[in-house]
Amino acid sequence: MNNRRKFFKSLGLLSATALVGGLHPKNTLAKTKIKWKMVTSWPKNFPGLGAGAETLARYINKLSGGSLEVKVFGANELVPPLGVFDFVSSGGAEMGHSGAYYWKGKTEAAQFFSSVPFGMTSQEMNSWLYYGDGLKLWEEVYENFNLIPRPAGNTGVQMGGWFNKEINTTNDLKGLKMRIPGLGGEVLARAGGTPFTLAGSEIFTSLQTGVIDATEWVGPYNDRAFGLHKAAKYYYYPGWHEPGPSLECIINKDAYNSLSDQHKSIIDIACKAANVDMISDYMAKNYQALEFFKREKVQIKQFPAEVLSKLNKISDEILLELSQKNNLSKKVYDSYVNFLSRVRPWTLISEDAYLSSFK
């Protein structure tokens, strides 16, 4: 009897060991060796954004046991910062890391998947993408471009930007030349300003030389890396234009479909991990950079309520007009607005109410 028990115990142990061993990437994927390129809209290894792309590649490399190797290229190494979409779509690279609002010229609906002025926070955005219709709609928007999108980072609510003049009323926005892309730029234009879409590497010189009067970039962490406090006098908050901006990993559909199910899962899981990593990185680094700006005597100012109210009204008008351009834009708009209207009451009595209780 004892020998029989030992036999079955040994058999069970061997079976379990075989099962675990079979699931290990080194065993199941060792025979494959795939090399991919990832192009980005960010300077190589730039804090936060560029580092987020490197983190994503590192996760994929490790989870695959080296069987899927992703090499990251910074902006202008293979393509210009705003050439990522077309390059990945055509198969020039298998992956890209960027922001969806850069592609409004390709499809207006793409802007909903980066950030909407006065829209969702990062937590609300992730909820819509992962547990609402967000990601499914994003895939539908990119389908005709031979691309598969995945959320792959979020900076959290941004700052309102750097200005070389004070903003006291909405009249101060008239004639303002500001680097601000996407829907935020459209809102500024309707308020009387002139929006510019510039790559990050062009911002400092443009602001310093007066080509632009103001710029938004990200927040203290990234703004300090570009030295923007040396080119403008006033630093405004809050970032009404980007309250919860998602960053994207775009994948060439043909390349993705050529992978095994296991490799596909590795990419999907790595994107989720990179998404969490980036928002955590920004929370940790933004407060440190903000302390630096305060020591440097940067004039940190809040937008007047009248200005924010006017911009909010304009934003609502623009979003409604956008929804009427085509059926797909309306479909995305309806989903976004409906989800926000339902999730926001919880945000207000949880996060917002908690923070307001200490004022």
Image (cartoon, helix red, strand yellow):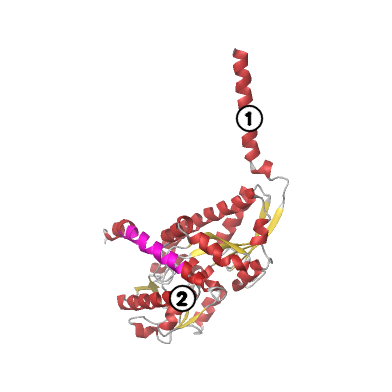
- Look at the picture and state if 131 lies above or below 225: above
- Look at the picture and state if 341 lies above or below 11: below
Residue 81 image-quadrant placement: bottom right
Q: Residue beneath label 1, please?
A: 15
Q: Which of 340 and 92 is in front in this view?
A: 340
Residue 94 image-quadrant placement: bottom right
Counting from the top left corner in percent of width and height, residue 90 is at 67, 68
Q: Give the range drawn in magenta.
A: 332-348
Is residue 134 shown left or right of residue 92? left
The quarter of the rendered structure image containing the C terminus is bottom left
Q: Nearer the viewer, residue 262 or 155?
A: 262
The disc labelled 1 sits on which kind of residue? Ser
Q: Residue beneath label 2, please?
A: 324
Residue at 30%, 75% (x, y): give it.
305
The quarter of the rendered structure image containing the N terminus is top right
The disc labelled 2 sits on which kind of residue? Gln
Q: Nearer the viewer, residue 298 or 270?
A: 270
Residue at 41%, 72% (x, y): give it.
160
Q: What distance separates the C-alpha of mark 1 from that of mark 2? A: 59 Å
Q: Is residue 280 magenta?
A: no
Of helix, strand and loop, which one carries label 1? helix
Q: Are marks 1 and 2 in contact (CB under 8 Å)?
A: no
Counting from the top left corner in percent of width and height, residue 228 is at 48, 74
Counting from the top left corner in percent of width and height, residue 88 is at 64, 66
Along the polypeptide, which appears first: circle 1 or circle 2? Answer: 1
Residue at 71%, 45% (x, y): give it.
30
Q: Residue 80 carries which label?
A: none
Q: Does the magenta stretch include residue 345?
A: yes
Residue at 55%, 64% (x, y): give it.
140
For the question of whether residue 7 can be seen, the reply is: yes
The total of numbered circles placed on residues is 2
Of helix, strand and loop, which one carries label 2? loop
